[in-house]
């Protein structure tokens, strides 16, 4: 009887709650399922999800577990006979998107210099970039220069960064660029916006 009791061997699997192929980028919800080989059936299941996560479970299939931060989490499943299955669950870090530009107010045809200003050290470098200049134009350069604002007005700038794990972040600056037309009412619009900032 004791030999059969200790023949139980636990196993577990996990996958992103959003479905197969979804990246595990923090914060993320993962679904855990437990199984075993041997006999008789386990009478207890004890989970520890690592990474300081307070959640534990005594269910064979604990379901949805939240991982709020990135890192390597050591997950342990222990059966009533003391046998365990241990595996590392890697939660990838998100990059951080932020940028500066110069100038922010200028005449039509001026070259505006956009600069991604986050270092993202350890967050999955190298990064890929996607800029939206607010007028239908875009760029994939880290620090693009753009002179295609041919109509007066103010334009929002958007930057999306993606790391080599596929995790993303984005940021938007409303009215990042204001372009003036000589001798037009646009000058008044721009001046009003500057005074309101």
Image: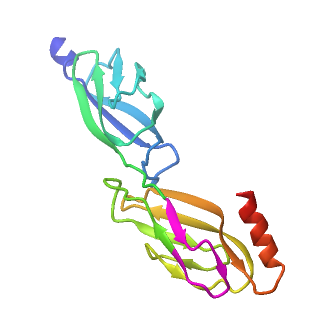
**Image quadrant occupied by the N terminus:** top left
Question: What residue is at 40 percent from the left and 18 percent from the top?
Answer: 58
Quick one: 66 or 116, which is closer to the camera?
116
| Residue 79 versus residue 133 in the image, above or below | above
| Residue 64 versus residue 90 in the image, above or below | above
Question: What residue is at 41 percent from the left and 23 percent from the top?
Answer: 54
Quick one: 58 or 191, which is closer to the camera?
191
Question: What residue is at 41 percent from the left and 39 percent from the top?
Answer: 69
**Image quadrant occupied by the C terminus:** bottom right
Question: Magenta part of the protein: which range?
Answer: 98-113
Q: Image check: 54 left or right of 79? A: right
| Residue 37 versus residue 30 in the image, above or below | above
Check the image and name the residue furthest to the right: 185
Question: What residue is at 61 percent from the left and 71 percent from the top?
Answer: 104
Quick one: 171 or 152, which is closer to the camera?
152
Q: Image check: 41 left or right of 194? A: left
**Total numbered labels:** 0
Q: Is residue 154 magenta?
A: no
Q: Name the spot of residue 137 as percent of width and height, x first.
A: 61, 80
Q: Name the spot of residue 96 as percent of width and height, x first.
A: 45, 55
Quick one: 165 or 60, which is closer to the camera?
165
Q: How is the image coloured?
A: rainbow
Q: Is residue 112 magenta?
A: yes
Q: Name the spot of residue 24 as percent of width and height, x first.
A: 42, 48
Q: Image check: 33 left or right of 181? A: left
| Residue 195 versus residue 143 in the image, above or below | above
Q: Name the spot of residue 59 as percent of width and height, x first.
A: 43, 22
């Amino acid at each position: 009887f004791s030999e059969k009791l200790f023949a139980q061997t636990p196993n577990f699997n996990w996958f992103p709650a959003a479905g197969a192929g979804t990246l595990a980028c923090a914060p993320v919800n993962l679904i855990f399922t437990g199984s075993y080989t041997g006999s008789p059936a386990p009478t207890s299941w004890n989970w520890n999800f690592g990474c300081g996560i307070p959640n534990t479970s005594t269910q064979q299939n604990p379901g949805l577990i939240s991982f709020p931060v990135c890192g390597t989490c050591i997950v342990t499943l222990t059966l009533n006979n003391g046998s365990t299955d241990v595996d590392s669950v890697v939660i990838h870090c998100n990059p951080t998107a932020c940028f500066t530009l110069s100038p922010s107010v200028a005449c039509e045809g001026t070259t505006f210099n956009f600069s991604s200003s986050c270092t993202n050290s350890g967050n999955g470098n190298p990064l890929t970039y996607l800029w939206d200049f607010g007028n239908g134009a875009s760029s994939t350069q880290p620090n693009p220069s753009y002179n295609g604002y041919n109509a007066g007005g103010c334009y929002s700038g958007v930057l999306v960064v993606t790391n080599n794990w596929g995790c993303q972040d984005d940021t938007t600056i409303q009215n990042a660029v204001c372009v003036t037309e000589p001798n037009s009412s646009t000058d008044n619009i721009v001046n009003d916006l500057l005074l309101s900032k």
